[in-house]
Image: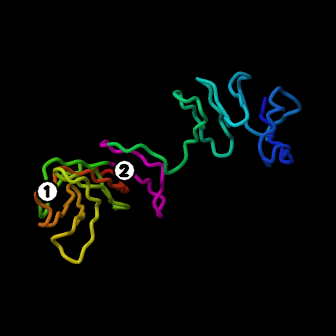
Amino acid sequence: MAVKMNKTYCGDGYPNLPDFNDLGGGDYTAGDGIAISDAGAISASLGDGLTVNAGKKIIPDVDGTTIGVNETSKKLECLVSGAFDYSTEEFDTGMLWVDGSKVYGKVVQSSSLSTGQNTIAHGITDLAHMVQVCGSVSTVSSGDLPIPVVDSAAANMVGVQAINATNIVLYIGSNYAGTYAPASANIVVLYTKAAPTS
């Protein structure tokens, strides 16, 4: 059975929505809408949006991507490119760089910081190109500083100066002292990888 996309449905002022009155079956063929493999897999009520019952999945045939089910809320979740969970382990972001390479990510943490240059091992293997770097430095007791902090005086700056094959070089200006002294850092790194060397 499929959910028939009724393109003229606008009885309640919601054009181009599925006509949920058609869920009970009918003259549906391939291409009519979202294929449902189990009659108990989907339900809907006014105001709640589309709800998928536990353990069920909707598989659109546009690009083969699975739209999964959030087991806690049972609401429909789309797994889209660019949506990812941050981790201190390397993860695939689902995005591609301009040359078609996969973009990976990792959160690099350090709890041993001082003013000046801090060299922090990132643990990334086969690093090819940096795509994006951001994050924050937590102070002793005055909140977080964004990475970067840009200022005309170097003593007020915070930023990543360099990333090489093994380390991140994080600079923290000399004015960050006392309650503003650096305590820890979370650095989010997005990057591409070279082919592993043998």
Q: Which residue is drawn at 55% across and 47% down?
A: 80
From the viewer's perspective, is 95 left or right of 53? left
Q: Residue at x 23, y 57 (%)?
A: 165
Taking depth in this image into account, of 103 and 145 the one nearest to the observer is 145
Find numbered disc 1 in the image and state the secondary structure of the residue it sits on. Answer: loop
Give the class, few, some or many, for how many residues have Cα within 10 Å of label 1's Cα (few <14, many ≥20): many
Among all residues in the image, which is located at the extreme bottom?
A: 152
Name the residue carrying label 2: 105
As shown in the figure, which amino acid type bears the numbered disc 2? Gly
Upstream in sequence: badge 2 or badge 1: 2
Up/down of 130 relative to 31, above or below? below
Contact between labelled residues 1 and 2, with CB atoms less than 8 Å apart: no
Q: Between residue 64 and residue 143, name the one nearer to us.
A: 143
Q: Is residue 186 above or below residue 147?
A: above
Q: In the picture, residue 66 is in which quadrant? A: top right
* Residue 143 placement (x, y as % from top left): 24, 53
Q: Quadrant of the N terminus?
A: top right
Find disc 1 in the rendering and name its residue. Answer: 181
Identify the mark at residue 145; answer none if there is no mark.
Answer: none
Q: x, y (%) of residue 71?
A: 53, 27
Stretch of the chain drawn in magenta: 88-106
